[in-house]
Image: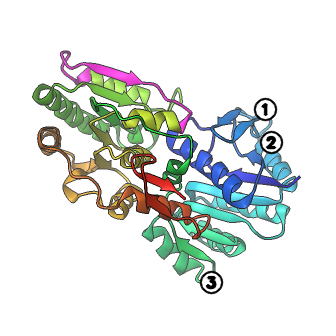
């Protein structure tokens, strides 16, 4: 039986990567006829609408380097490799591994879909990426910056600008969002400085966010929901969310929403908020997909790139390095009172662009499916 190896940052308890895995596996089934998958992940996974999969990798490794041999074995048993979504092409170590896997699988038909390219950690990584792009049959990049990089380092590779894979989930025939009254302010923060950076800078930002949330609640009466997009016990979102909550006025009703590995459940949750305040890239993307207004707290070029691509109004974009409570409060209170301006790119167009990763033959039309958007 033909096996397809799905490569990405999967099984890391991250809602964005969960969505990318689900979209990759669903797309491979629908458009390529794939049925048997091996997933590059350190834990057992249940992928909605696809199936249950054993862990490929060990965490922790008993023997250093043993996971690489597991990946080599998976490649040897596979007929195709798909790199599905995410910022997966930037590190020399990972790029060299990916090239090794393609060599072990052999043949053609290998794909990279909805991926981000760069920034590279070294000149050697850039060179390795150029060789990898040349080896792939098709590369769909999710943003203009990635397309520019690909064209510069591998001008003869088959690379097209497509879109993030996540919006393609909206074409799932059994996924519907029941209409309901929106309630609350969703918050999706990222512990960026706890992974790399200046903790003092984080403290300043968190205090500004806490103050803005206080003022937004006292103005509108809306409770605050801290939505964990990363459930890792050490590096996940729970700690930073609880720290912000502790900075807030004790009279503000606060709730914590645990990480959920099912992206469809997370979409349901995001669809219930009146507005979302998000550092997480896929927090912003999920809000957009469910037509929930989003204030994007940008800490990385990929966040600003998404805002440009989706047409998020400039006054709803905030630089995390210079975030001020007053400007954040003004936008929250005005939007909660008078309504928020949505992104200019229609969701249907985003679904079309996402599906372009697989085929240009599928078109989304305006129907009564998923708030008016369905693939036919």
Q: Nearer the viewer, residue 101 or 81?
A: 81
Q: Secondary structure at mark 1?
A: loop
13 and 338: which one is in front? Answer: 338
Judging by the rendered image, the residue that carries numbered circle 1 is 62
- What's drawn in magenta, residue-wise? 246-263
Circle 1 crowding by C-alpha within 10 Å: few under 14, some 14–19, many from 20: few
Gap in angstroms between the C-alphas marked 3 and 2: 35 Å
Q: What residue is shown at x 78% (from left), y 32% (from top)?
A: 62
Instruction: Choose top left, top right, bottom left or bottom right for residue 192.
Output: top left
**For mark 2, what is the residue?**
66
Q: Is residue 195 left or right of residue 358?
A: left
Of marks 3 and 2, which one's residue comes earlier in the chain? 2
Instruction: Give yes or no for contact between labels 3 and 1 (Cβ–Cβ under 8 Å).
Output: no
* Front in this rendered view, residue 157 or 122: 157
Q: Which residue is mark 3?
A: 156
Q: Position of residue 368 (x, y in %)?
A: 42, 49
Q: Give the x, y percent position of residue 145.
A: 44, 69
Say whether marks 2 and 1 touch (CB < 8 Å): yes
- Which quadrant is the C terminus positioned in? bottom right
- The correct choice, above or below, for 126 with respect to 241 in the image is below
Q: CA distance from mark 2 to mark 1?
A: 8 Å
Mark 3 closeness class: few <14, some 14–19, many ≥20 residues within 10 Å: few
Q: How many marks overall?
A: 3
Q: Quick one: label 2, few (<14), some, or many (20+) residues within 10 Å? A: few
Q: Is residue 30 above or below residue 148?
A: above
From the viewer's side, name the closer residue of 352 and 36.
Answer: 352
Image point (68%, 76%), residue name: 134
């Amino acid at each position: 039986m033909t096996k397809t190896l799905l490569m990405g940052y999967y099984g890391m308890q991250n809602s964005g990567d969960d969505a990318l895995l689900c979209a990759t596996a669903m797309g491979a089934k629908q458009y390529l006829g794939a049925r048997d998958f091996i997933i590059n992940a350190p834990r057992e996974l249940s992928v909605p609408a696809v199936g249950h999969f054993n862990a490929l990798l060990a965490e922790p490794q008993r023997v250093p380097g043993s996971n690489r041999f597991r990946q080599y074995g998976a490649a040897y048993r596979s007929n195709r490799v798909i790199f599905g979504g995410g910022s997966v092409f930037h590190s020399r170590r990972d790029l060299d591994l990916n090239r090794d896997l393609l060599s072990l699988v052999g043949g053609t038909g290998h794909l990279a879909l909805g991926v981000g390219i760069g920034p590279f950690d070294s000149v050697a990584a850039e060179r390795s990426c150029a060789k990898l792009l040349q080896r792939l049959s098709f590369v769909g990049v999710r943003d203009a910056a990635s397309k520019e990089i690909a064209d510069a380092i591998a001008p003869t590779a088959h690379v097209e600008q497509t879109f993030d894979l996540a919006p393609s989930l909206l074409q799932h025939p059994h996924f519907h969002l029941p209409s309901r009254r929106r309630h609350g302010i969703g918050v999706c923060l990222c512990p960026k400085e706890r992974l790399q950076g200046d903790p003092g800078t984080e403290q300043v930002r968190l205090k500004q966010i806490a103050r803005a949330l206080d003022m937004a609640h006292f103005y509108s009466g809306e409770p605050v929901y801290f939505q964990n997009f990363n459930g890792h016990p050490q590096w996940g979102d729970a700690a930073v969310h609880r720290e912000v909550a502790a900075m807030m006025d004790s009279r503000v009703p606060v709730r914590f929403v645990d990480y959920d590995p099912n992206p469809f459940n997370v979409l349901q949750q995001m669809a219930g908020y009146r507005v979302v305040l998000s550092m997480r890239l896929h927090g912003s993307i999920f809000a957009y997909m469910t037509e929930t207004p989003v204030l994007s707290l940008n800490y990385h070029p990929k966040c600003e790139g998404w805002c440009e691509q989706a047409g998020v109004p400039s006054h709803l974009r905030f630089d995390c390095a210079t975030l001020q409570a007053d400007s954040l409060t003004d936008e929250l209170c005005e939007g909660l009172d008078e309504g928020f301006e949505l992104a200019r790119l229609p969701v249907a167009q985003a679904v079309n662009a996402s599906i372009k990763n697989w085929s240009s033959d599928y078109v989304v039309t305006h129907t009564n499916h998923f708030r008016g958007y369905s693939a036919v």
